[in-house]
Image (cartoon, rainbow, N blue to C red):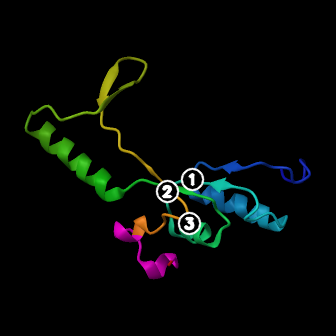
Amino acid sequence: ALTANNNKIDAIVASNDGTAGGAIQALAAQKLAGKVPVSGQDADLAAIKRVVAGTQTMTVYKPLKLIATEAANLSVHLARNEKPSYNSQYDNGFKKVDTVLLKPIPLTKANVNILVDDGFYTQAQIGAK
């Protein structure tokens, strides 16, 4: 795609960090890594290292501890036949389903240490200061 477009690309919005990594390899082959904004999601360690290095602009972090805590709370309420607290509804095309929406965190070089604060990675693993 890069060659077909004479390396003219504005940005890459990848569905996950693995795909972002592949896109960055293609950009690197054209000497464009770090010059084209690339986003991914999942905050995998390789992506975090690319964010710190400047070849990946950002990734989306979904705090697993928060997700697990909310899932456990919902499960406990349902097991006790209690109505859980929901903060939204999702229309699945058949009906509106009560839902708990959690806020994902866009991670950039500026806030990558959130992962250390959350215990997701160590400072040594991510290589950031």
Q: Name the residue carrying label 1.
A: 16
| Left or right: residue 11 compared with residue 102 | right
Q: How many marks?
A: 3
| Left or right: residue 62 compared with residue 2 | left
Give the number of the mark in front: 3 or 1: 3
Q: Name the residue carrying label 2.
A: 42
Q: Which mark is residue 3?
A: none
Q: Name the residue carrying label 3.
A: 109
Callout 3: 10 Å neighbours few (<14), some, many (20+)? some
| C-alpha span from label 3 to label 1 | 18 Å
Residue lying at the far front in this picture: please name it.
Answer: 110
Provide the residue span drawn in magenta: 116-128
Residue 46: quarter of image: bottom right
Q: Of helix, strand and loop, which one carries label 2?
A: loop
Quick check: is 4 in the magenta stretch?
no
Q: Residue at x 9, y 33 (%)?
A: 81
Question: Which of marks 1 and 3 precedes in the sequence?
Answer: 1
53 w.r.t. 98: above or below: below
Q: Of helix, strand and loop, which one carries label 1?
A: loop
Q: Position of residue 121 (x, y in %)?
A: 41, 72
| C-alpha span from label 2 to label 1 | 6 Å
Image marks 2 and 1: residues in contact by CB distance under 8 Å? yes
Callout 2: 10 Å neighbours few (<14), some, many (20+)? some
82 w.r.t. 5: above or below: above
At label 3, the amino acid type is Lys
Residue 123: quarter of image: bottom left
